[in-house]
Amino acid sequence: MNSGNYYGRLSDCHLHTHFSSDSDNPPENVIKQAIALGLKSICFTDHNDFDYPLEDGKVVFDLDLKAT
């Protein structure tokens, strides 16, 4: 059995960023860490918290949606 680095064959398909209310990690940091670990692929699975406010009170997403 090969005892080498298996990260190049692994993926993480459940990652949250600061766009979810349960994480404060920016996407850039997650990507850098995945590269450092040699992950094959990653997938962001942020929550649908469109109105989740940042510490400065601003809303993360400012969608210009018009109801029809």
Image (cartoon, helix red, strand yellow):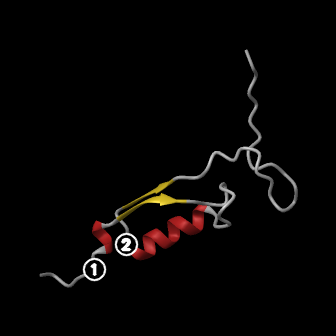
Q: Is residue 53 left or right of residue 7?
A: right
Secondary structure of the residue carrying tag 1 is: loop
Instruction: Answer with mark 1 or mark 2, whichever residue precedes in sequence.
Output: 1
Residue 38's disc is 2
Instruction: Find disc 1 in the rendering and name its residue.
Output: 5
Please state the horizontal and vertical placement of residue 32, each as a whole percent of the image. 51, 70
Q: Are marks 1 and 2 in contact (CB under 8 Å)?
A: yes
Residue furthest toward the left? 1
Please state the horizontal and vertical placement of residue 4, each as a whole percent of the image. 23, 82
Please state the horizontal and vertical placement of residue 11, each as a whole percent of the image. 36, 63
Q: Quadrant of residue 63?
A: top right
Q: What is the total number of numbered labels drawn onto the structure image?
A: 2
Secondary structure of the residue carrying tag 2 is: loop
Please state the horizontal and vertical placement of residue 3, each as a whole percent of the image. 20, 85
Residue 23's disc is none
Residue kind at label 2, given as amino acid type: Gly
Q: Quadrant of residue 16?
A: bottom right
Residue kind at label 1, given as amino acid type: Asn
- Which quadrant holds the C terminus? top right
Q: Is residue 7 left or right of residue 26?
A: left
